[in-house]
Amino acid sequence: MTRDDPGPVPAKPLAGFTHRFIPAGSGGPDPGLTLLLLHGTGGDENDLLQLGSMLSPGAAFLSPRGRVLESGMPRFFRRVREGVFDVPDLKARAAELAAFVTEARTTYSLAGRALVAVGFSNGANIAGGLLIAHPGALDGAALLRPMVPYEPEMPPRLSGVPVLIAAGDSDPYGGVEAIRRLEAILEGGGARVTVHRERAGHNLTQGDVTAAREWLEKEFGKRKS
């Protein structure tokens, strides 16, 4: 079985989330890292496994499916309309995802491993919600084509937490000002934010993949066993 062939890996429920877990070392040396893979609208628990293999082939992968359906497409939280989030639902779903992460740490014996979210689009936005309201759930996050989840009443508690924001210059959802605001919110809570920009829209490019891989190596390579 290869890391980008999820077929033989059974999907399981945990804390209400259908998900896949792939142990570390299946695709290379174990870097002591677990990637929490959070898909975009219409994706599922298989969607980002190949991306995870490109970013850190020996890492463990924890990949849940969003529990909200929009016209039959899985999402991690509801929205009022395109580009406008249902903030109360986002906060509630972020709490559910934080509970999933806590249970998964025990179920899969992840204690002592760095757990880093890699989220695309809707997945990046729920990861942002985790950072703002449940900062202890994550050791870092790569936010690929994010928006501002919501304006927190108080700065998040993110002292020293590394965060990558991968933005597209032509992304209709995450414009320059929105990315600057997201960066300010996270840095205001003490996060160490790296912003990578591509001449692209909402879709990811090879440049994004390279930047995320290099960021993971820089920030978490020191934790290799």
Image (spheres, grey):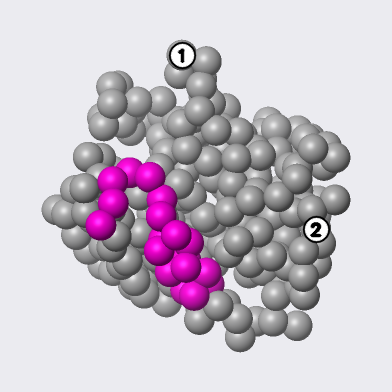
Q: Nearer the viewer, residue 172 or 186?
A: 172
- Name the residue tied to disc 1: 71
Judge whether residue 4 can be spotted in this image: yes
**Mark toward the start of the polypeptide (2 vs 1):** 2
Residue bearing the label numbered 2: 23
Assign the C terminus to one quadrant of the image: bottom right
Q: Is residue 47 magenta?
A: no
Q: 187 or 69: nearer the eye?
A: 69
Q: Quadrant of residue 85?
A: top left
**Extreme residue toward the bottom, this view:** 222
Q: Residue at x 28, y 26 (%)?
A: 82
Residue in the picture at 62% in, 56% down:
52
Q: Residue farthest to the left?
A: 177
Quick check: 3 left or right of 114?
A: right
Q: In the figure, 92 relative to 121: above or below?
A: above
Range shown magenta: 199-216
Q: Which of these two is toward me, 187 or 64? A: 64
Whole-Å distance between the Cαs marked 2 and 1?
33 Å
Measured from the top left, where is residue 200 in percent x and y?
A: 28, 51
Is 44 or 207 nearer to us in this picture?
207
- The three-letter amino acid code for the residue at tag 2 is Pro
